[in-house]
Amino acid sequence: MSQPQYTLYVDKQFISPYAMSAFVALTEKNIPFALQTIDLALRQNREAVYAGLSLTQRVPTLIDGAFRLSESTAIAEYLEERFAAPTHAPLYPPDAQQRAKAREIQAWLRSDLASIRQERPTEVVFFAEQRLPLSDDAQIAKTKLVAACETLLGDGAEHLFGTWCIADTDLALMLKRLLRNADQMPPKLAAYAERQWQRPAVQQWLQLVHQAQQADA
């Protein structure tokens, strides 16, 4: 059997939200790929070999032959253009304005809400670690996040734009940072996040998290 053309580099513990996003994107597209891990705790991402592959020296990084691409949103957009619908499942809505909103949400989740990301790191999501109550700054960020979700998701909406897109996975992970620590959340947002968490591609990633935990035990 020939080796997959694509290789995705992710963190060894499988707790990077951005590595998860790229993994889900490839899996949803049904693109065969090899998985390689980098131990961020040992700073393997700073070593010459990986630094030669990744412009940013971060995860994820996608290898496509001689082409190397880092940053999860760049990877998702590249895959969307290279493997377009209807041959492959879409990662973004077909409507131009909805597609722009999906990218807006992705950019916002990566550039804002820093206090939530700091006080509810992904260890909370994947390892169910309990943290101290949210600081005032994080409470403000949470209020902002909930308000945005209330606007984006109508009553009982299963997805942001009618059908699944990669921004749903990213948003669900942000909500899970709070839910996994038992921070209060409107029931419909909790239900939305849980539906997204049950998506097969997300469940495949969670299985990798579990296997990594078992290996380190």
Image: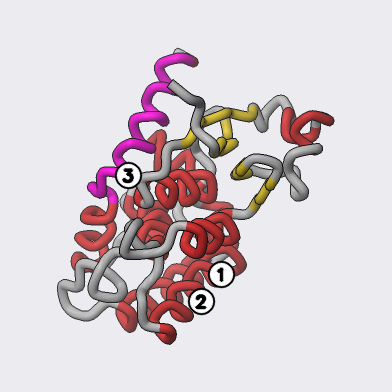
Numbered badge on residue 119 = none
Q: Which residue is mark 2?
A: 104
Q: Position of residue 24 (x, y in %)?
A: 40, 48
User: Which residue is the site of mark 3?
Assistant: 201
Asked whether residue 93 is in view, the answer is yes
Of callouts 1 and 3, the N-terminal one: 1
Q: Residues within 10 Å of mark 2 (few under 14, many from 20)?
A: few
Specify the quadrant that holds the C terminus.
Answer: top left
Q: Residue at x 47, y 62 (%)?
A: 80
Please report contact status of discs 1 and 3: CB closer than 8 Å, yes or no: no
Residue 37: x percent and y percent? 58, 28
Q: Secondary structure at mark 2?
A: helix
- Nearer to us: label 3 or label 2: 3
The numbered mark at residue 107 is: 1
Majority secondary structure in the magenta region: helix
Residue segment shown in magenta: 197-215
Per the model, the C-alpha gap separating discs 2 and 1 is 5 Å
